Amino acid sequence: MITPVAAALLAVTTLLATGCGGDDLVPLPTTTPKSHTASPPPPSAWRITKQGAEHEIEGYADHVSVLPGERFTLKVSTTAPRFTVRAYRMGARPAETWASGKIPGVRQAAWRRDEGMVSAAHWKPSLTVDTKGWQEGAYLLRLDASTGGQRYVPVTVRSASTAGKVVLVNAVTTWQAYNRWGGYNLYEGPGGFAQRSRQVTFDRPYDTSGARLFLDMEKDAIEVAERSGVPLAYLTSLDLRPGILAGARAVVSMGHDEYWSPEMRAEVTKARDGGTNLAFLGANAVYWKIATKGRVVQCDKELRCPLWRESRPESALVGQMYDCFPAEADYVVRRPGHWIFRGTVGRRFAGMAGVETDKVSRGSPADVEVLAESPLSCGGRSTVAQSTYYTAPGGAGVFASGTMRWVCAMRGRHCGHGVGSRPPPSPARRRPTCWPGSPRGRRGRSSGLSLAGTATVVHGRQGECDAGGHGDGGRHGHRDPVAGLGQAGVQRRSHQGAQAPGLGERPGGHGDAGSGRTPSGRQPRVATRVIADDSHPTAVSDRENSAPTTVRNGMKLPIARPAASTTAVI
């Protein structure tokens, strides 16, 4: 029987590798630093408890990201007489890092339509926030109106250097593409697709809670990464400029990373070619070829913003490309012995393939390995969702989950769609694991795993923790051929070569093809995650147009909408 613990463990952040141990601003009202008490706030203190009326309170920051110690300005509009702001650093233990005093509330002017896009750039500054003493990371600033309404403003305190670190990238260009604040985004306007914006700006609040796509697609992956103990760096997609990834160990694209500029792709490709590992934990990545101009994302989906696959298929970087929406299927492991799945139990995982899925296509590397293949129906068209792995010529490992529910599944049953809905395995079936913080060489058991558990790190080094061989009997001299994919144009052949590096390790060339070890003598390592606690509304709501879509000639087209799944809403 497939168990919920197995389904949870399959939510692997494959990129993380660790051992067993571990602009001048206008003068604005002065804010009062938070007085910290000895007792930390409860873990859920950051959550919105009452969103309030549509425009009761909302705001945005004039910087998408800042370096530690830099300042940014908040522009807030509210119908309340007063409001406060609290900053929470999100991650393994969300914590309040700063709080403002009471700020007089102002109802700002209505949004304007500027060059076809909704803008609130004319709003007056409300307060300046100084990030002195803040750690690098992803932050949510919660706006609390005195009348009870609340909204988030996301800000990333980015890393100045990524050398030697696993880089987590907030997909802010995609957040903005889907942001319908003011009634317009890159998908629709009041009259549907024809009245959509052809460009969108960060000079406006985000819709709904203010952080919908961050909460749906990224928050849980960041928690997993931080619990793994690996050195981390934090960037947004707008920060992917030349040189920023120099020396990075790995780069993680999280749940939904659809909108990529040539500059973004060039920097990530250069990093991969230099040996930096990549992990795409969602689906539909690198789909639209956008332009960015300051705080504006340009994509008319006609002349100035073609699909990447029309010139340079995204599969050349990702290993696969977008194929289906809406998708709803069990996730089926094809190669259970592969080291990616180390520490999991079972081969079929309920509901994990969806709501958008990818598969191997033209442009995929010839030696791409298909690790999972999930049959599904896409609006009546039979297809599959695939998870893939390939090794780039420079030695970097590239993993792609091929499903938008990889991150969602980290929440277990709270993901919906049947994920995590089966009983736990017996202790006898659980594999020995090495817990974060335990001494090297010490063996532990994952008997404490539960649906509210934390990260388990599988180290897999010979003589330490899981000392047995990795993957297919500990040998990867021969990889499975790309056969039986049912995908025209894919070259079917096997690949002989070195053991693939652990995704968080810097590769150093070719190792012993039959040893199951990396050039350093280490076997690959992978951090796995058992559940966080949240919900996933976008499995139903996140769509290209007002109706679900399918793919025809590389474009998403509307199809009949299936019955919505029942999920909790943040």
Image (cartoon, rainbow, N blue to C red):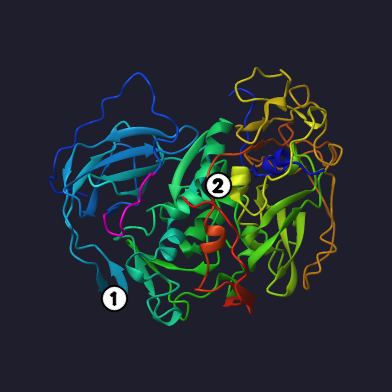
Q: In the picture provided, is 496 more to the left or to the right than 134? A: right
Q: Please report the residue visible at 53 percent of the width from the left and 48 percent of the height from the top.
A: 535
Q: Which segment did they paint magenta?
A: 48-56
Is 20 left or right of 332, judged from the image as shown?
left
Q: Is residue 230 visible?
A: no
- Using the rendered view, name the quadrant where residue 282 is placed: bottom right
The residue labelled by disc 1 is 115
Considering only vertical position in the picture, is 566 above or below 177? above
Q: Would you call the spot at circle 1 few (<14 residues within 10 Å), some (14-19), or many (20 or more)?
A: few
The answer to whether residue 47 is seen in the rendering is yes
Report the Cα–Cα distance between label 1 and label 2.
Answer: 35 Å
Residue 87, compared with residue 55, is above or below; it is above
Residue 492 vs residue 395, the one in the foreground: 492
Residue type for callout 2:
Val
Please tell me in which quadrant of the rendered image residue 360 appears. bottom right
Secondary structure of residue under mark 1: loop
